[in-house]
Image: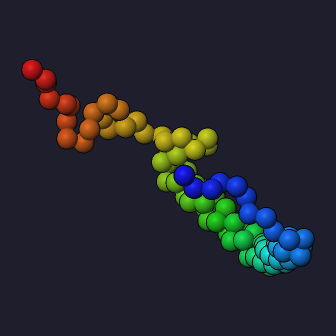
């Protein structure tokens, strides 16, 4: 059976690990802070593009003011494009 006890480390090893973790967290924060403006701009552009698509679909009469399709489906919801399911024996 394997030994599942935690290894003992010295105070110096613990302090070194904590310092390394603090440096890593600071580095992650720098990267996140630098990436935020680009992510915000991309999100705004995506929202604008999606808004234009919805307006175009409304102008074409395919969506109503609430974003719902204006035409009923051309077949019942249970029916596949290949027709109704076959009978089971």
What residue appears at the point 40 percent right and 36 percent down from the top-left corner?
A: 72
- Between 64 and 81, the one lying in front of the other is 81
Q: Is residue 27 visible?
A: yes
Left or right: where 83 falls relative to 43:
left
Residue situated furthest top in the rendering:
89
Q: Is residue 25 visible?
A: no
Report the colour scheme: rainbow
Quarter of the view holding residue 14:
bottom right
Q: Where is residue 89 shown, x and y percent of the image?
A: 9, 20
The correct choice, above or below, for 38 with respect to 74 in the image is below
Q: How many marks?
A: 0
The correct choice, above or below, for 67 with respect to 56 in the image is above
Q: Where is residue 76 shown, x and y percent of the image?
A: 32, 31
Q: Where is residue 87 shown, x and y percent of the image?
A: 13, 24
Residue situated furthest left in the rendering:
89
Left or right: where 69 falls relative to 12:
left
Q: Where is residue 4 shown, x and y percent of the image?
A: 65, 54
What residue appears at the point 35 percent right and 32 percent down from the top-left corner?
A: 77
What residue appears at the point 64 percent right and 66 percent down from the top-left corner?
A: 46
Quarter of the view holding residue 33:
bottom right
Quarter of the view holding residue 18:
bottom right
């Amino acid at each position: 059976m394997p030994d599942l006890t935690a290894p003992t480390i010295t105070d110096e090893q613990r302090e070194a690990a904590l310092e390394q973790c603090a440096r890593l967290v600071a580095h992650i924060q720098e990267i996140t802070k630098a990436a935020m403006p680009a992510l915000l701009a991309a999100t705004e552009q995506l929202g604008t593009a999606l808004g234009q698509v919805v307006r175009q679909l409304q102008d074409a009469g395919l969506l109503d003011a609430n974003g719902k399709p204006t035409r009923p489906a051309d077949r019942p919801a249970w029916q596949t494009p290949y027709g109704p399911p076959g009978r089971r024996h």
